[in-house]
Structure formats: C-alpha cells, structure tokens
Image (cartoon, grey):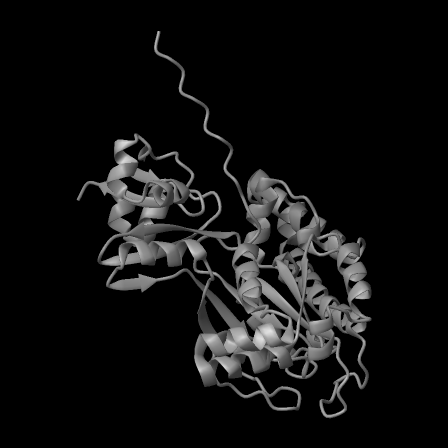
Amino acid sequence: MAPKKAEEAPKRVLLGRPGNNVKMGIVGLPNVGKSSMFNIMSKLSVAAENFPFCTIDPNVARVPVPDKRFKELCTMYKPSSEVPAMLTITDIAGLVKGAAEGAGLGNAFLSHIRAVDGIFHVCRAFEDKDVTHVEESVDPVRDLEIIHSELRKKDMEQCQTFITNNKNLYEKKVGGKEKQFEYETIQKALKVLSEDGKDIRAVEWEAKEIEILNTMQFLTAKPMIYLVNISKKAFIAKGNKWLPKIDEFVKARDCGDLVLPFSVTFEQECMDAELANGPKGKQEFMKTAGARTMIPKIIKSGYEALNLIHYFTAGKDEVRAWSIKVGTLAPKAAGIIHTDFEKGFISADVMQFDTLVELKTEAAVKAAGKLQMKGRQYEVQDGDIMHFKFNN
C-alpha cells in the first residue's frame, strides 16, 4: 500500500497585497515633519515649506534596508556589484479634518494612501512658534484621532457603496455561496468600523475573509508605525510629555502598532554632519550629542511591517538581497530572480548565514555537510543564502 502524502500546511493568508512590490507611505497632518522626514530618509530634495498642501503629488524613493549580514557578505565575497534590500517610501501630502468628505485635497490624498501598503504615521509633539499648526495648537493625540477618523470614514464609505450595489443580488442569492459570503464579510467589516469603532486590522479574520478584504484595499487594514516628531532637546533627553499619552492611545487601539520617537531637527543635523565630514563626522556628532539616529530603525521597522524578509545570492560577481513576503515557498522566491527559475524549479541549495560566517567558505560548509538541499515546499527564511537549480 502506497504511503499517504503528507498533508500540506494550510496556506498562510496575510492582510494586504501579495508579492514583494509593496511600499510604505508617510502620512500625517500638514506641517508635522513628513516631507522633512522623507528628505532625510531618501536624501532627496523635495519641497518642505511651512504651509499646508506643499506636497501635492506623492514623492517616491527607494532606500536601502540596513542589514549587517549583507555588509558582511560583501566583505567576504568582494563582489563587483552590491545590491541591498530596498524599501519604497512615498511622501503623501497632509490630511486635514474632513478629508473623507473632500476637505483640503482630501480625496486625492486618500487615494494616494490606498496605493501604499503600510503607513508611517507622523505626528507632531514639539512646540515651535515659527512652524504653524493646522489645528492652531500642539496636541498629538487629537491629531492622531483626526487621521484615524478620516481613514475609518473612507473605509465605511467603501463598505456602504459595496453593500448598496450588491444588496439585490445578495437577497436574490445570485452568485452562489461565495458571493453570499463576500457580502456578509463586507457587512461584518462595516460593523467593525462603525459600531465597534475599530480598524480592520484590529480584528482576527478567517483566511477566507482576509482574501475578500484584500480585494477592497481598506485603509485601516494597512499596518501602521507611529513616528513621533519631538524636539532635539527632548530626543537627546529621551523624554517628552506627550509620549505616555500617545502610547496609551496606540495601545487602546489594540493593533499592536509600534511607536518610535524621533527628532527631525536631530536627524537633519546628523545628516548635515555626514555630508560635511563623511561617516566619521556623523559618528562624532552622535557621540557628542549622546544619541543615535533613528533612521535605520525606522526603515527596518517599515520593512518588517510589510511582512518582508530577504534571502541572499552571493558570489564574486554580485551579492544581492532579494525581498520576499514571509511564508514564501522556494519556487516563488526563485521567481523573484527570473520567472524561468520558478517555472523550471528543481531544488534550492541553502546555507545558513551563521554557518557560512563560522566556516568561512562555501566549500567548508559543503564539506561539513551543512549545505541543505530544499524542495518545492521549503519556506524561505530570512537571511538564507540560496542557489537555485532549474530546468531551462
């Protein structure tokens, strides 16, 4: 009697678009430091004037994801080409109260948020009489609620439109069980948003429900990281009166979101020191200030919020990090390099990064029996060093 096939693990379904071509958007009220933050992260020069709606068209940049493993592989192989993992970021113009009803340039900006996959939510927790505030006073918790309210309103509007357009079909049971389930899932989403007052991502959804929600690209389904812009003095002192209140607000939302305090002023001075005197200038500035830049942590946190990891290919010609979603199987990971690799996938030779560092060379890893051959069901792990075998 032939042995039974091992049961495949249930497919992991995540909120958000599939694939690795995903990006983070920088969102917040006007004049909270969004464009300045984008400028520093990308080292691009975009407008950052002191008035609302300075940024009208989204600005996009790709920034390298900090990874010591990548640097170590480059040192080891000394390749002709070095290609790190990249995070795509988009600077989106400031939202204002009433954006969901079209206030300011609201509808256009909300569509820009829909086009990204995760949100860096920048809020202002510093006083500066020279930088106007669209709400005329500094209160980051109020500002956070304004943004959340606008995102939730837009999602409710989308649910209501879907329900109105499909009500007759649902009542007549047109489309079978799948269409019925789709309609009921959107009804459930509307209840979560309106009656429960929660974001889509705050709820545990079934895999089938997530597949439906992902077709809607809800704004409140997107992962969010809160970037709290404080003064240089408060950043160095590691204290600000608003931070405990912001933490309390974020925890109450029950989404498990990250809060990262930073200072645009500090980061700008840190970057200026590097531009003037190179990496040593930057290190000296941070040492003198007694604080370190938050940019690497912010970029890495955004990358992780998008459920991205990366594997490496390494050789004398090139060391490269290839971004994939958590849970990606070996053939699909191979297809990131070239579609032919996925179509003709045979197997993957996999080295663990720590093993290669310990044994120094690929030959030594192989001789020690630690080069692993993986098949089609192998779930690629962050930091794997891979070589694919495929049929042409």
Q: Position of residue 323 (x, y in %)?
A: 41, 55
Residue 166 in picture, x, y percent from top left:
63, 54
Q: Is residue 80 above or below residue 364?
A: below
The total number of labels drawn is 0
Res. 184 in view? yes
**Could you tell me which residue is drawn at 65 percent across and 43 percent down?**
205
Q: Quadrant of the N terminus?
A: top left
Q: Left or right: where does residue 324 sit relative to residue 109?
A: left
User: Which quarter of the picture shows residue 231?
Assistant: bottom right
136 versus 330 height, above or below: below
Q: Is residue 374 visible?
A: no
Horizontal relation, residue 233 to residue 54: left or right: right
Q: In the image as oriented, which residue stretches furthest toward the bottom? A: 130
Q: Nearer the viewer, residue 319 or 172?
A: 319
Residue appearing at x 70%, y 51% in the figure:
202
Q: Camera-side residue: 378 or 96? A: 378
Residue shown at the point (79%, 57%) measured from the top left: 197
Does residue 200 appear left or right of residue 372 in this picture? right
* Left or right of 285, for residue 77: left
Dividing the image into 4 quarters, which one contains the C terminus? top left
x and y percent of residue 387 in the render? 28, 44
Question: Eyeballing the image, is 383 above or below 283?
Answer: above
x and y percent of residue 223 in the render?
61, 58
Q: Residue furthest left?
A: 392
